[in-house]
Image (cartoon, rainbow, N blue to C red):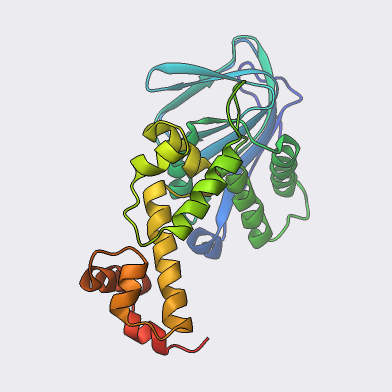
Amino acid sequence: MKSTELGVLRKSEVYFSSPSQTAKKLYYYPVSAGHFFCVKGYHLIRNNYNSLLITHIIDGTFTFVKDGKHTTARAGDTVILDCYKPHEYYTNDSFESIWIHISGANSFDLFQEIEKNEGNLVKCRDINHVKKLLFRIYEGISGDNPPTELNMSLDIYKLFAELLNPQSIKCKGESNYEDNIQEIKSYISENLNESITVQKLADKAHMSTSHFSRVFKQQTGFSPYDYVLITRLNKAKYFLQKTEMTVAAIAYETGFNSESNFICFFTENEGISPGKFRKLKF
């Protein structure tokens, strides 16, 4: 379907999709998709479109407005926007983009995680994979033999995965973050029964606490604090299943300041007490 918007060249195409009730309840699904060629004069201002927008810039410049700030994406960049709220974007020269509007499942939660970690403009590790996924979804909507809604949902989730795991841009002179974080993870594993603070970990990594926390989250998917707790929890599970250690001893070995705190934390996270977990057969 040809677009008739001002500033959108006639060779541009847009297609729409309506999900089944099953897709609305369980899947990620596309609302619309397009392959646009836009020139100066293209300027969209809209109150809402009940979806999220993922657009990948193939050529030119694409500028979006967020909280009064104008941010320009260029070739190779991917932009994700909340179109449930008022939104605005335009070009000062021209651009080519492949885009989809999506909704469903926990898509908004994933959007918030991406926005919190990376903002709305993301430089993905595998640009070609992002383009391939977007074009596959676009062609699925536009073709006469569309893929199953489950397959479409899987492709959308893969897009989210690309946006959640962007490339790590290193400045000249920066240390190898992967090696640093691996050393910190080893230190945590070997010292669970000690007091482990974010400040102590940042000092060992020779970073400020804020920089360390950001890098650690980027490398592992966890904040340092959450990673320590999860590591303690997993070690406790191992002790419960593989040793005869008492619950009190396990609490001490995994760094909890009391048996009662350990039992409360374990039960809250696992849904059963340490004693009941120990009796489970794997």
Q: Is residue 111 placed above or below 81 in the rendered structure?
A: below
**x, y percentage for residue 8?**
66, 20
Q: Is residue 258 placed above or below 245 in the rendered structure?
A: above
Q: Image check: 138 left or right of 227?
A: right
**Does residue 97 show up?**
yes
Q: Image check: 144 left or right of 268?
A: right
**Does residue 273 show up?**
no
Residue at 64% across, 59% down:
149
- Nearest the camera: 175 or 277? 175
- Nearest the camera: 88 or 118? 118
**x, y percentage for residue 104?**
50, 53
Residue at 36% across, 62% down:
193
Q: Is residue 166 placed above or below 68 in the rendered structure?
A: below
Number of callouts: 0
**x, y percentage for residue 55?**
61, 33
Q: In the picture, which quadrant includes the N terminus? A: top right
Q: Quadrant of residue 60?
A: top right
Q: Quadrant of residue 93?
A: top right
